[in-house]
Every structure is written in structure tokens, then in C-alpha cells.
Image: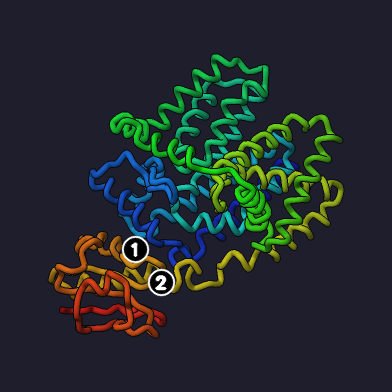
Amino acid sequence: MRLNKSLWILLGIIITATFLRFYHIEQLAVFLSDQASDSTKTFGMLRGQFTLLGPITSVGGFYNGPIVYYLMLPFYWLFKGGMISGTVFQSTLSVLTIPILYLLAKKVFNERVGLISMFLFAISPLMIDYSRAAFNSYPAIFFSTLILYLLFSVHEKFSKLRMFLLGICLGFIFQMHYFTISLLFFSFAFPFLDKKISRSKFYILLSIGFVIGFSPFLIFEFRHQFLNARLLLNYLQSSNISTKSLGNVFIIWPEITAKLILGYHFYLGLLGFIGILFFSFYSYIQNKKIQSNLRLFSILFILVFIVGLVYGGVMQTHYVIAFHTSLIILAAFIIDRLFEKNNAALLVFCGLLIFVNASAWNIDKEKHPLQKGLAISDFKYAASIIHKNNKEKYNVGMHAQGDNRAMPLRYALNLLNETPVHYDNYRDIDNLYFIVRRNEPITSLKMWEYTSFGPSRVVKRWDINYEYFLYKLGK
């Protein structure tokens, strides 16, 4: 009877999570310049243009690995490269994380903590937001959870297959974001934390798996004299650890806690994070049965903290993505302890969490706020207008989303086999299509993409939506 009850709860949570992630997915999907660039690379692979490089990092001038392109490829094949392909991939991966999170939390603590962890993940505003954007770092949520599950499984019983899979997952995740090196350090230190594990077998299997998982990027590095490794080392040598970097690393944790489970309310996140630290430490002292597992989480947290400290700059939420689901599990553990003997109070508390987080889900919005008024459907509509209208040499641009090159529009045109001139050339063209806000005169634009076209006249204008026009400009 208890097993059936748990299965129903598990199924209900997965259905809820699926609804929150797939509801109005095309309207709420994030499709900005980064997503358009990654989609162009992935769609190119369908046409035989394979790559060994992922997207460039925001600092340092080095690149991530290409593994996310390869993981997304089946979805782009299934949806014929449609602009929603990457979002469906990310949303699917987010839902698949839930049963693994349940198994991990159940293994580390108990089944009740597993169910609470699933619930927190399902309604998490940050996890829902991550699911709506095909961004190179976000699949690390799934793989970090799987890596921890495999490690804790090996902690219980050594398995050659799990060790091999662990190595592959580490090879994958390190291509998604360099901050996930904390998981690499944690995994390689694991035999010293668990003396029952055979170190020789552990490292051999882990290394073989890692080389296989990391192989696409490793091939590029061999071919180019370890270019990215050298750029990364140069960046690390130039980084400075200071009191400012210490402040950046500290401030990210209440921010993450708020975005994960407390509706983006920073001060609630601050109280929540302090509470998690205090109760985890208190439980470590009081309960010897869970000391080993809490110690492992503590070591991982310290490693993530140190990596952030070495980075030194302003931290973004995905920089500490290696600890996202660990923080959820620790929060679930504390909630379980607080309502250990009172299921009714636990249900009330869960209802309160839904109330606190609901407004941050954005399911009532017509478009995701990050889209700034231009959704996937708007770019598809603009592309169809250009496709029907234009027969001459042309280029495109826009004054929106901080993306003057109009990468989402370029990708929508690519799907229609349209080829505007490259975005480094706005001079040697006959026509220029430009998306601009309705309340902004086209003649007031100052960006290079418009001014380098030269003296122009408005040939035609179309309504894209209630916020934007599409202009066709001629010489």
C-alpha cells in the first residue's frame, strides 16, 4: 500500500513538472542570440557540417565543448530543426532529472526526502526557467544529478559499469561549463573519502569513461596544440582572488536559494540558505547515521565555493550549477526533519511554497520576459514575410534584445532556405529588413547595422506584433 502511494505521488509530481515546463512552450521559450547561434550549429550538423567546438565562453576567449550540440541533434532531427527543438530537449531533460533526483535523495537520506526533493524541483522557478532555454550550461543539471547518484551508488556497492558511466558523464559535463570542474575534483577525490573503494579500478574506469565522454573536444585540442587549454591557463593566471571575489561567491548562495525554492525573493533566500547551513550542521552533530553523506555534500560545496573564488568575477546562477540539486536535497532534508511527525503541516507548507513560487513561473505571460516582446512566432512571421517579399540581395537587423544582428531572425530564415548576407556586411546590399519598436522612428537609429547601409528610404512596413514593426529599406 505504501509503495503504491509513493508511486502515485511520484507520478503526480512528474505530471505537474511536465505541465509547468511544456505549457505554452513556444510562447514562453527563450530564443535569443545564444539559442539562435547554437541552433544554427546543431541544424548545420543535420546537413553534415559537424563541429568539435561548442559556444565561446563569456570570459577568456576560449570555447566550451560541443557535446550539447550532439545531445540536441536527435531533437533537431525529430522537429526538422524547428526553433522549438532545443527548448523541447531542455524541458525533456529537466523532467528526466526528477526520477534520478528522487533515487539520489532516497539513497542519501530516505524516501520521504526523495519525494520532497522531487516536489521542490518540480515547482522551482529557476528549474522551470532553465527548461525554457536551450543554453549550453543547463543540461548540467541532469548530468550533475546523475553523477552524484552514480557516486553514492558506488559508495554503497562498487560497480564497474557505474564507474565507466560516471567517467562518460564527467566528460560530458565538463564541456558544458568549466565551473563543473568542481564535480571532477570531487569524483577524483572520492576514493580518499571512501576507503572501501579500490583506487586502481576506480581511476582506470573513470579515466577511460572520461576520455570517451570528452573525446569530441579532446580531438580538437590535439589538432590545435591544446589551444583552449592554453587560453584557460592564461586566464587563470591573470585572475585575482580578492575580498570583492569573496563577496561575489557569498552573495550567489542566498540568490540561488531564492530562485530555486523561494520565488526569487532574495531575503527569503538569505534566511533559507542560513537555515539550510545551520540545520545541516546541527544534524551532522546529532545524527551519526547521516554524517558520512552530509560530509560529502559539505566537501562538494567547499569545492564549488573555491572554484567561484578562483574565478573572482560576478557570479551568475549557472556558475554553481554543480550544486543546484544538492541544495534542493539538503532543503528537502531540513523540511523532512521539521515536519517529521506531522504530514498535515507538511502539506500546508508545500501549499505555501506553491503560493510563494507561482508568480515566478511566468505561465500567465504571453512571452517570456527575456524575449522583450519578440517570441519565436514573431520571428517566424517576419521570416515568412521576407521569404515571400524579397528576390534581391539583402541583410537583416533589429533594434531589440541587445542583438543588432538579429540572430533569431537569421535562423528562422535559414529554415526557409533563405540566406541573408553575413552580418559583417551591411553596405553592399540592395535591401535591409529591420525590426524596430513601433514607438521608435526608424530614422532615429544610430547603430552600425543601420547607418552603414547608407542613405535609405522606407519601401514597406509590416506589423509584427503590437510592439514591433518590420521595415524594408531600400537605397
Q: Please, is residue 198 above or below residue 273 in the view?
A: above
- Whether residue 348 is visible, yes or no, is yes
Closer to the camera in the image, 83 or 54? 54
Residue 431 coordinates in the image, percent (x, y): 18, 74
Whether tag 1 and tag 2 are in contact, CB under 8 A, the answer is yes
Residue 223 coordinates in the image, percent (x, y): 28, 31
The three-letter code of the residue at mark 2 reads Leu
Q: Residue at x 49, y 18 (%)?
A: 204
- Whether residue 119 is visible, yes or no, is no
Q: Residue at x 32, y 62 (%)?
A: 407
Circle 2 residue: 374
What is the quadrant of residue 347 in the picture? bottom right
- Badge 1 or badge 2: first in the primary sequence: 2
Closer to the camera in the image, 76 or 434? 434
Residue 102 coordinates in the image, percent (x, y): 65, 42
What is the quadrant of residue 345 in the picture? bottom right
Helix or strand or loop: what does disc 1 sit on?
Answer: helix
Instruction: Give the Cα distance between marks 1 and 2.
Output: 10 Å
The three-letter code of the residue at mark 1 reads Pro
Q: Residue at x 48, y 66 (%)?
A: 370
Residue 426 coordinates in the image, percent (x, y): 21, 68
Instruction: Give the position of the N terminus as an image quadrant.
Output: top right
Q: Residue 408, which numbered label?
A: 1
